[in-house]
Image (spheres, rainbow, N blue to C red):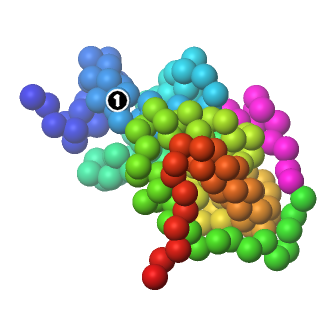
Amino acid sequence: MVNEQELVKACQNNDRKAQTAFYNLYKGKLMGVCRRYTRTPDEAEDIYQEAFVKIFNNIHTLEKAGAVGAWVRKTVIHTAINYYHANLKFQQNTDYENTLLSNDDYPNLLANLSNEELLTLINQLPDGYRMVFNLYVIDGYSHAEIGQMLGVSENTSKSQLSRAKELLRKQLKPMGIISYERT
C-alpha cells in the first residue's frame, strides 16, 4: 500500500491514479466537515469537489508532505467559507460590544449526541450562527480569525456564537440534554 507522502509526491507529478486515491483517502474524513457548513449533501459534495480542484492545482506548493492533512482540512474549510460567501450572502447581526459568553461545557454536552444528531442541530441554526459555531467550537478558530475569514468584526463573531449557543440550548433541552454548572 502506498503511504500518504508517496501519494502527495505522485499527485505533485499529476499522476491521475494517485489523485483519485488521494481524493478518496480524504473523502470519508472531510465530507463531514463539508456537511457541517452546508444545508444539503449536494452542497457538501460541491464544496468537497471544489476544494480538491484547489488542492490539486496547488499541491506542488506543499513543501512538507507530512503536513498534508492539516493543509487539506484548512483548504476544505476555506472553500466552504468561500462557497458560503458566494451563495448565501452572509447576514451580519448587530455588533454587540459587550456580549457575554457563558462558560458552559459545550464539547461535553455535544459529545452526548450522535454525529447525525449534531449535524441536524447545527444545520437548523441560521447561516451566520452556523458558520461561527463550526469555526469556533468545532474547528478551533479564534474570534479574530473568524472575523477575518467572514469579513465581520470580532465582536460580531462573539455575538453570533453566543446566539448560536442559546439556540442550541433551546434545541437540546427537549432532548433531555441541559447545561450544568461546574462545581
Is 150 inside the magenta-drawn segment?
A: no
Name the residue at the right extreme: 94
Q: Is residue 33 above or below residue 16?
A: below
Q: Is residue 156 above or below residue 175?
A: below
Residue 137 falls in which quadrant of the image?
bottom right
- Magenta residues (range): 82-93
Q: Residue at x 55, y 26 (%)?
A: 44
Image coordinates of residue 141 in percent, x first then y, are: 56, 61
Say left or right for 60 vs 117.
Answer: left
User: How many numbered tags mark residues here?
Assistant: 1
Crowding near the residue tagged with mark 1, few <14, some 14–19, many ≥20 C-alpha atoms within 10 Å: few
Judging by the rendered image, the residue that carries numbered circle 1 is 28
Q: Amino acid at mark 1?
A: Gly
Q: Is residue 12 above or below residue 160?
A: above
Magenta highlight on residue 88:
yes
Q: Nearer the viewer, residue 64 or 176?
A: 176
**Which residue shows up at 86% across the image and 53% down it?**
93
100 or 56, which is in the foreground? 100
Q: Quadrant of the N terminus?
A: top left
Drawn side of residue 95 relative to residue 2, left or right: right
Spot occupied by residue 153 in the image (x, y as percentages of width and height): 80, 64
The residue depicted at 78 percent of the width and 54 percent of the height is 151
Q: Report x, y in % for residue 62.
A: 38, 47
Residue 144 visible somewhere in the drawing: no
Q: Relative to residue 3, is residue 128 depicted above or below? A: below
**Quarter where residue 102 is shown:** bottom right
**Residue at 27% from the left image edge and 17% from the top image edge:** 17
Q: Can the viewer see residue 133 in this picture?
A: yes
Q: SS class of the residue under badge 1?
A: helix
Outermost residue, left side? 1
